[in-house]
Amino acid sequence: MTTGTDRSLTTVSPKSYGLGLHLRLVFGGALTSFIGIATVCGFLVYQQVNIFQEEIARSTTELREAIVERGRILGESLAKNMENAIAGYNFTFVAESMNLMKEGKDDIAYGYVTNSSGVVIVHTDSDRVGDKKPVPLSLQTGGHRELSGDRAVLEIYQPIVVGGEVWGNLTLAFDVWPLQARAAEALIHGREVL
């Protein structure tokens, strides 16, 4: 009888091991598939985040370049309109032009006109008239620079020519904070989505 019992144990035992091995293989395969899919998904999300950040940086740069171009065109136009008034010492017209220009544009932080000595003749903030603001030598023929501090602005410089000579300079400062804020919001929203 011991032989019959031993046989029943030996016949049950291989079936039990066969079923356990099958479950282990299925579990191992499922775990491997899960880890593989999770790795691929993680990599794809990482790539999408990088692409998204690069795209926002590219768009921000393009918008900044558009601000510079718009400022250059506006500066040229204003400087041309101011030439006759400045030649006739009609600074009231120049001041009115600057204030009207600022009122119509939310993204213009300030604007001012300096003479060749760098003294502010007209400013959108009348308290600043008389201040000394020399234009950097590299920007006296026109150009732009970005200033940071209390308020991030992009200053556009345009020379004012009267009688064939450079009389002074027109400076328009565009507020870049809204642009930076929109880029930051887009990055935050993108992270939430991804």
Image (cartoon, rainbow, N blue to C red):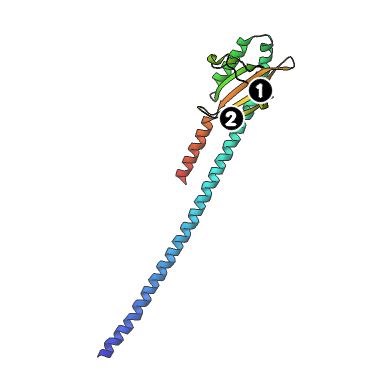
- Name the quadrant containing residue 170: top right
User: Could you tell me which secondary element the residue under label 2 belongs to?
Assistant: strand
- Amino acid type assigned to the residue bearing label 1 in the image: Gln
Dot 1 alpha-carbon crowd within 10 angstroms: few under 14, some 14 to 19, many 20 or more: many
- Amino acid type assigned to the residue bearing label 2 in the image: Glu
Q: CA distance from mark 1 to mark 2?
A: 15 Å
- Name the residue nearer the viewer: 138 or 44: 138
The image shows residue 39, relative to residue 126, as above or below, that is below
User: Could you tell me which secondary element the residue under label 1 belongs to?
Assistant: strand
Is disc 1 in contact with disc 2, using a CB cutoff of under 8 Å?
no
The image shows residue 65, relative to residue 74, as above or below, that is below
Outermost residue to the left: 1
Dot 1 or dot 2: first in sequence order is 2
Residue 135 in the image: state x and y as whole percent: 64, 22
Q: Residue 115 — which label?
A: none
Q: How many numbered marks have been drawn onto this rendered protein structure?
A: 2
Residue 120 in the image: state x and y as whole percent: 60, 16
Residue at numbered disc 2: 146
Q: Residue 158 — which label?
A: 1
Outermost residue to the right: 164
Dot 2 alpha-carbon crowd within 10 angstroms: few under 14, some 14 to 19, many 20 or more: few
Image quarter where the N terminus lies is: bottom left
What's the residue at 36%, 75% (across, down)? 19
Q: Is residue 165 left or right of residue 118?
A: right
Disc 1 or disc 2, which is closer to the eye? 2
What's the residue at 45%, 43% (across, down)? 192
Residue 47 in the image: state x and y as whole percent: 53, 50
What's the residue at 58%, 38% (across, down)? 59
What's the residue at 45%, 64% (across, down)? 32
